[in-house]
Image (cartoon, rainbow, N blue to C red):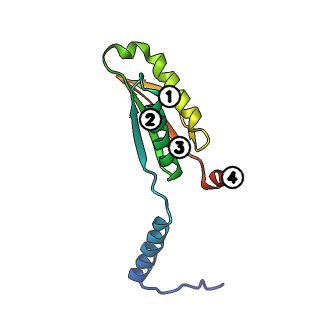
Amino acid sequence: AVPPVCKLMDYGKYKFELAKKEKEQRKHQKVINVKEIRITPNIDEHDFNTKLTNVIKFLKLGDKVKVTVRFRGREVTHSSLGVALLERLGQCAGEYGTVENRPKLEGRSMFIFISPNSKSEQTV
C-alpha cells in the first residue's frame, strides 16, 4: 500500500505476548534426564539382569542411560571384558533404546550411552 500502513502498539504488551508464547513452548518440551548405572566387569548373571531391568525401566520412562563399568585395581588391564559386557547390555536393551557410541575408556571407567526409542516405535 502507498503510503505504507503501520500500526501503533504497546511495546510492553508485545514483550508480554512474546514471553507468554515462549513459556508455552517450554511447557511442551521434554527435558531429557541422564540416568547412570554402574557395574563392575566381574558382575554375576543375576546382578546383570537386575541392572538390565533398571536400564529398561529408565528407557521406558524416556530417560537417557549412561552405563559405566568401573575397573578396580588391575582389572583395567582386561578392558576387553568391559567392552564385551557393555556390548551385551546394549544388545539386550536394543528393543527399548539405541546405543549412541562405542564403549569408551576414560581413566578407570568405560561407558556407553543408550538413548530411548521414540514412543511410536515402543508401542509397536
Quadrant where the image shows the N terminus = bottom right
Tell whether 2 sits left or right of 112: right
- How far apart are the two marked residues, 1 and 4, measured between alpha carbons? 26 Å
Q: Is residue 52 above or below residue 70?
A: below
Q: Earlier in the sequence, mark 2 or mark 4?
A: 2
* Frontmost residue, 32 versus 23: 32
- Residue corresponding to mark 2: 67
Count of numbered labels shown in the rendering: 4
- Residue corresponding to mark 4: 124
- Residue corresponding to mark 1: 86
- Per the image, label 2 sits on a secondary structure element best described as strand
- Residue corresponding to mark 3: 115
Q: Where, by quadrant of the figure, is residue 37 drawn? A: top left
Find out whether the residues at labels 1 and 2 contact each other: C-beta distance under 8 Å: yes
Q: Earlier in the sequence, mark 4 or mark 3?
A: 3
- Per the image, label 4 sits on a secondary structure element best described as loop
- How far apart are the two marked residues, 1 and 2, measured between alpha carbons? 8 Å
Mark in front: 4 vs 3: 4
- How far apart are the two marked residues, 1 and 3, measured between alpha carbons? 14 Å
- Per the image, label 3 sits on a secondary structure element best described as strand
Callout 2, which amino acid? Val
Q: Earlier in the sequence, mark 1 or mark 2?
A: 2
Using a 10 Å C-alpha cutoff, classify the residue at mark 2 as few (fewer than 14 neighbours), some (14 to 19) or many (20 or more).
many
Q: Is residue 72 above or below residue 91?
A: above
Q: Earlier in the sequence, mark 1 or mark 4?
A: 1
